[in-house]
Amino acid sequence: MAKFFVNPANKKGHINPELQGHFSEHLGRCIYEGLYVGENNKDIPNVNGMRTDVVEALKEMKIPVLRWPGGCFADEYHWKDGIGPKETRKKMINTHWGGVVEDNSFGTHEFMELCRQLGCKAYINGNVGSGTVQEMSEWVEYMTFEGVSPMADQRKANGHEEPWTVDYFGVGNENWGCGGNMTPEYYGNLYRRYQTYVRNYKPDKPIYKICCGANSSDYNWTEKVMETCFKHPTPPHVHGFMDGISLHHYTVPGEWEQKGGATEFDEKKWFLTLKRTLFMEELISRHAAIMDRFDKDHVVGLIVDEWGTWYDVETGTNPGFLYQQNTIRDALVAGINLNIFNKHCDRVRMANIAQLVNVLQSVILTDGPRMVKTPTYHVFNMYKCHQDNELLDSFVETKEIGLEKDNMVPNLTESVSVDKDGKIHITMTNLSIDEAYAIDGEIADTVIASVKGEIVGGEIHAHNTFDAPEVVKAVAFDAVTVNGSSIKFTIPASSVLHLEVTVK
Ligand code: AHR
């Protein structure tokens, strides 16, 4: 039996709902087809062009925040091309993603309308790589200024009287790579300059400014950017100069040229995938340790605004569209990462899985009018229980499992939180392919009244298709025994479990 302890007296931090955030780029069929089908579409039910089935599913999952328009696309996006009458909007080539024509029919107004329908926060990513300071500054003015100004007047003329709220603003994306191939010192200086003109026109809703952070284990980038940006000339640190710094890390189970497919993988690949996912723990710890040296009060958030699995594209699909299926393996990747983010909620303020629909590790796949919820969707839908909760101190006894010495993983991961009504939420992942584990748990100083459970699991390759959309879904889990503060259950192989515990 594996010992499992929760100490409700030790609250370790607030779990921002944004830890379960999402990302939508002008890439493949994410925006077009996946989210937006056009205002005049008679075949796919929609409200102002946003497909109703997808919006409803995302609302159910309580999507807290959506990042847009990229990704690499953000640093070649010129926002003025995407406003005004659709027939006069400029067409451009989407050079990063398949070289297709981007007609700009989905722009700022459409994105804000999507966020309105979803009831989620807006995270806009600005263009540093090929855009000017003026362009970035004017975009913020266009979106958020209420009074009389050239940009606010234009917004009003385009049909939106009221300013929107921009909750998060990214000053560039991957500026070490597709966003301009910069050095950290050079980018750091540009950040200082560009962010100056990202004005806060709504003092009651200040924009949370995000500085471009590292690619995976590029610790030097974090070090140099923190050094250049955090210690700016107005000490002590002023809120609104640098609120967050990003981190991108994808789970790539192989070499770039040979990552392997989403649904065809062997048991070694299963463990390699989970091992590379667990690397997120080390990444966050090490980047956070660097941040600590500059920012001991944890003012700056670590924003993991791109994460998820990246496999070879599905056979017969455009390689530039990054369309992949999603199995129980992805459910585990989601559960493991979300547990890690919870455990680091003192530093990680937002995380955005890539990407929302039809691209990489999506929660939703579409095919014409059809839609399917992936195993990853069902994990997010379970983990919504943690949103806005307090993280509790918890520990599970683990052992190493795997098939290759270099790719051993712990058999279990977990995180625990308490919600506003005092209910305790346990989420646990079992990384084994074939072994269930008996858990002998203790929630200190409580008397447990009842437990409700749900689980996503199954054979490791199991996935949903348009013809069989419910092969993987969350099902009730009630095989739990409680007695006083003791809680015992057996977590099945390759599964993600949520237990909601009511205490007396
Ligand atoms: O999510 C796909 C791409 O991955 C993004 O555009 C980019 O930021 C990252 O390299």
Image (cartoon, rainbow, N blue to C red):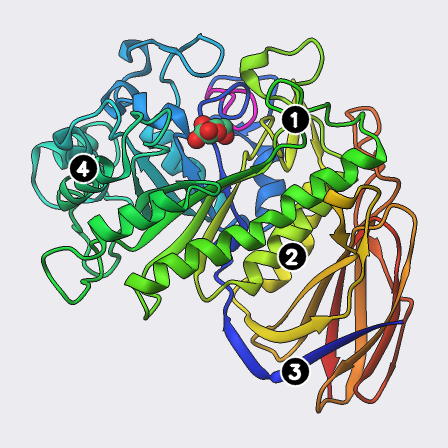
Q: Give residue 70's position: percent from left, percent from top.
A: 40, 30
Q: Give residue 441's position: percent from left, percent from top.
A: 80, 77
Closer-to-camera residue (132/257): 257
Closer-to-camera residue (272/34): 272
Give the residue drawn at x 24%, y 22%.
130
Q: Mark 2 points at which residue?
A: 383
> What residue type is disc 4 on?
Leu
Question: Which one is earlier in the sequence, the residue at label 4 or at label 2?
Answer: 4
Question: Which one is earlier in the sequence, the residue at label 3 or at label 1?
Answer: 3
Q: Horizontally, is 154 left or right of 148 in the view?
A: right
Q: Residues within 10 Å of mark 4 (few under 14, many from 20)?
A: some
The circle drawn on residue 311 is 1
Q: Name the residue under label 4.
A: 190
| Tag 4 and tag 1, C-beta contact below 8 Å | no
Q: Disc 2 beta carbon < 8 A from ligand 1?
A: no
| Residue at mark 3 to residue at mark 1: CA–CA distance | 39 Å
Instruction: Confirm whether the magenta stretch covers residue 34.
Output: yes
